[in-house]
Image (cartoon, grey):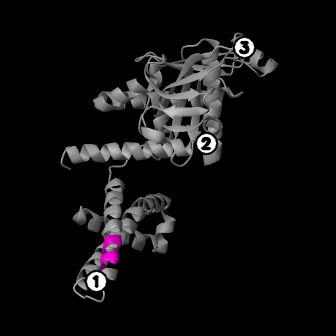
């Protein structure tokens, strides 16, 4: 690990020298690449230098132990320095974990009502609103692409694009079955009824990464449904694109412009096909994708929203850290929950690396 850290420190020095050259600002692509690399390497090198200082402090305190007058002070300093060194060692292991190559990508988000009928659709609408509020908190741009609603304002299914720094790195843990326990608006007896909705999260694919042959597409136009007044009923601005080789279908009716709807639908289709291609290449990715959507029932739940007890429980976490305030979460304050999931994921990966002897 030491050699790897030393190499990273040398590389950061190289990057910073290149960024100090005024000529690099004439090449936007190089500037972006170097700035991103600097941002990724700096936390590692900062922790490495702090670890080196802790090692130096340990050695200095060890030498002072032989001095009777300084022994007590040296023991205290040695204890402190060792604790700091050990803490930084664990931090460096975490920082050196392989980075998810999709972490900086934008996201395609899909929400679907599961069991529970109308209540499941109302819960799906709550989840969609929760992600919209979270995107707003993070300074991201979330745009609805498709929405199939019920008469009571529930959502049977919806898809949206979320654009912003770190969107995938934060939202990838949201994929799976979400369960709710509350008294439904449709329940007159006041009885608590469990319902569920599924969330799928996909990294957005760039056009250069996945090209689609126009001959493989069937593009249909139709009139939008839902809110929108007379315009919705008179103009065939909605788009349905079918990828003939796979049978994959994407619809978009959020924009009044047929061109914009087509552009968005193609973006989603490209991301879905790109993900499907990744699944074929990597069995682990295929298993992950399958676990994202599940069956829409309550058996494969990742999280429960318990309104009577005012808590959200994430079933991938353990101990007290798995419970969160439901009002905060449902209103978009997802960072504490996602931070806990990120740390748990890192701990699991570190454990797996230890077991493999890495």
Horizontally, residue 8 falls left or right of residue 108, namely left
Disc 2 secondary structure class: loop
User: Number of numbered discs present?
Assistant: 3
For the residues marked 2 and 3, what is the alpha-carbon distance in whole angstroms?
28 Å
- The dominant secondary structure in magenta is helix
Distance from the alpha carbon under mark 2 to that under mark 1:
50 Å
Residue occupying image coordinates x 41% and y 18% = 246
Mark 2 or mark 3, earlier in chain: 3
Specify which label sits upstream in the sequence, 3 or 1: 1
Residue range corresponding to the magenta coloring? 74-80
The residue at the point 24 percent across, 79 percent down is 62
Residue neighbourhood size for the residue with mark 1, other residues' Cα within 10 Å, grouped as few (<14), some (14–19), many (≥20): some
Residue 202 falls inside the magenta stretch: no
In what quadrant of the picture does the N terminus appear? bottom left
Looking at the rendered structure, the secondary structure element under dot 3 is: loop
Q: Which mark is residue 151?
A: 3
Q: Nearer the viewer, mark 2 or mark 3?
A: 2
Which dot marks residue 333?
Answer: 2
Where does residue 358 sit, x and y in percent of width and height?
20, 50
- The answer to which of marks 2 and 1 sits earlier in the sequence is 1
175 or 255: nearer the viewer: 175
State the CA–CA distance, disc 3 to disc 1. Answer: 77 Å
Q: Quadrant of residue 230?
A: top right
Disc 1 target residue: 71
Is 346 on the left-hand or right-hand side of 21? left
Q: Residue at x 39, y 24 (%)?
A: 290
Query: Can residue 48 be seen here?
Result: no
């Amino acid at each position: 690990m030491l050699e790897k850290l030393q190499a990273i420190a040398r590389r950061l020095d190289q990057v910073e020298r290149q960024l100090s050259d005024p000529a690099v600002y004439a090449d936007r692509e190089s500037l972006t690449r170097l700035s991103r690399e600097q941002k990724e390497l700096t936390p590692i090198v900062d922790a490495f230098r702090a670890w080196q200082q802790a090692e130096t402090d340990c050695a200095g305190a060890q030498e002072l132990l032989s001095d009777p007058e300084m022994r007590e002070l040296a023991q205290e300093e040695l204890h402190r320095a060792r604790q700091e060194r050990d803490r930084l060692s664990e931090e460096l292991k975490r920082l050196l974990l392989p980075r998810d190559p999709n972490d900086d990508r934008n996201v395609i988000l899909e929400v679907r009502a599961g069991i529970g009928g109308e209540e499941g659709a109302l819960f799906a609408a709550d989840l969609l609103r929760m992600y919209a509020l979270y995107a707003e908190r993070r300074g991201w741009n979330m745009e609805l692409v498709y929405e199939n609603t019920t008469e009571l304002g529930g959502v049977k299914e919806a898809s949206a694009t979320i654009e912003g720094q770190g969107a995938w790195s934060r939202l990838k843990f949201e994929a799976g079955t979400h369960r709710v326990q509350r008294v439904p608006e449709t329940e007159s007896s006041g009885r608590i009824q469990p319902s569920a909705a599924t969330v799928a999260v996909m990294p957005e694919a760039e056009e250069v990464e996945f090209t689609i042959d126009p001959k493989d597409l069937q593009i249909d136009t139709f009139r939008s449904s839902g809110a929108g007044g007379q315009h919705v009923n008179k103009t065939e601005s909605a788009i349905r694109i079918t990828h003939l080789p796979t049978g994959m279908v994407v619809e978009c009716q959020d924009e009044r412009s047929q061109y914009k709807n087509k552009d968005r639908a193609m973006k989603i289709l490209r991301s879905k096909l790109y993900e499907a291609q990744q699944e074929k290449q990597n069995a682990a990715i295929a298993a992950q994708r399958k676990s994202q959507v599940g069956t829409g029932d309550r058996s494969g739940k990742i999280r429960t929203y318990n309104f009577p007890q005012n808590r959200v429980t994430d079933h991938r976490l353990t101990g007290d850290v798995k419970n969160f305030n439901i009002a905060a979460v449902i209103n978009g304050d997802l960072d504490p929950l996602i931070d806990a999931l990120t740390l748990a994921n890192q701990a699991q990966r570190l454990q797996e690396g230890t077991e493999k002897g890495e």
